[in-house]
Image (cartoon, rainbow, N blue to C red):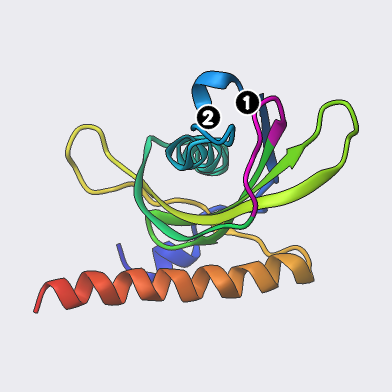
Amino acid sequence: MDDTKLQNRPAKPAAEERMAEIILPHQTNGYGTMFGGDVMALMDKAAAIAALRFCRLPIVTASTERLDFRTPIEQGEIVEAFSRVIYVGRSSMVVRVHLFAEHPLIGDRRLCTTGYFSMVAINRDGGPPPVVPQLLLIDEDARAEHAIGAEIHAAIAARRNAGRS
C-alpha cells in the first residue's frame, strides 16, 4: 500500500476504555497481593479491548512494553483498568494501560501499574495485514501520549530491525 492510500484511510479518536474486577484469593500470592502474571493478563485484556474497539479488526498482542509495577494490589480490592490506543502504524497500535486499585469499603484509589502494549491487526486468512484507521489527536493529552507511543513504536521497530542483521 502506498503512502497516499495510508493517508486517506479513515481517521477517528480513541476512546478511553474501562474494565473492573475484584481480586479474589486465587489471584494472590502468599503475601495476599495480586500475582504479577494476573496483573499482566488483566492489562493485556484491557489493551485488546481498546485495540478492538478502535480498529474493529482481528488483533493479537505483539509485545509488552515498559511495564511498571508501582504498588501492590491487595486481595479484596477492586482493580480498574483504563486503556487507550495512543499511536497507530499501518497495522499496529500502541495501547497505554493504567491499572488502579481501590479499597472497596473506603474508596481510596491509587495507580498501581502502567504498561504499554503493541497490538497488531491480522488477516486470519494469511493475506497481507489489514490497515488500521488513523488516530485523531483531539487534545493536548492525546498529543502528549502520541509522542510516547511514537517513541515506543520506534523502539519496537529498532529491535525488530536489529534481529534481521
Position of residue 139 relative to residue 126, above or below, is below
Kindly identify which numbered label has been placed on residue 5.
Answer: none
Query: In the rendered structure, which segment of residues is drawn in magenta?
Result: 71-79
Q: Which residue is drawn at 68% across and 34% down?
A: 79
On residue 28, which mark appears?
2
> Mark 1 — residue?
23
Q: Is residue 119 left or right of residue 69?
A: left
Crowd class of label 1 (few under 14; some 14 to 19; many from 20; radius 10 Å): many
Q: What element carries label 2?
A: loop
| Circles 1, 2 touching at the beta carbon (< 8 Å) | yes
| Of pointers 1 and 2, the one earlier in the residue sequence | 1
Q: Which of marks 1 and 2 is in front?
A: 2
In this picture, residue 160 sits left or right of residue 7: left
Q: Badge 2 local density, few (<14 within 10 Å), some, or many (20+)?
A: some
Tell me which amino acid carries mark 2: Thr
Residue 31: give x, y in percent of width and height: 55, 36
Q: What element carries label 1?
A: loop
Q: Position of residue 75 (x, y in %)?
A: 64, 28
* Left or right side of 102 for 118: left
Q: Where is residue 142 in the image (x, y as percent from the top left)?
A: 70, 65
Decide whether the magenta segment is chiefly helix, strand or loop: loop
When asked about the image quadrant of residue 137, the answer is bottom right
Badge 1 amino acid: Ile
Q: Which residue is drawn at 56% across and 38% down?
A: 46
Give the spatial CA distance, label 1 vs label 2.
8 Å
Which quadrant of the view contains residue 123?
Answer: top left
Residue 139 sits inside the magenta stretch? no
On-image quarter of the N terminus: bottom left
Identify the residue at the far left of this view. Answer: 165
Closer to us: 104 or 40: 104
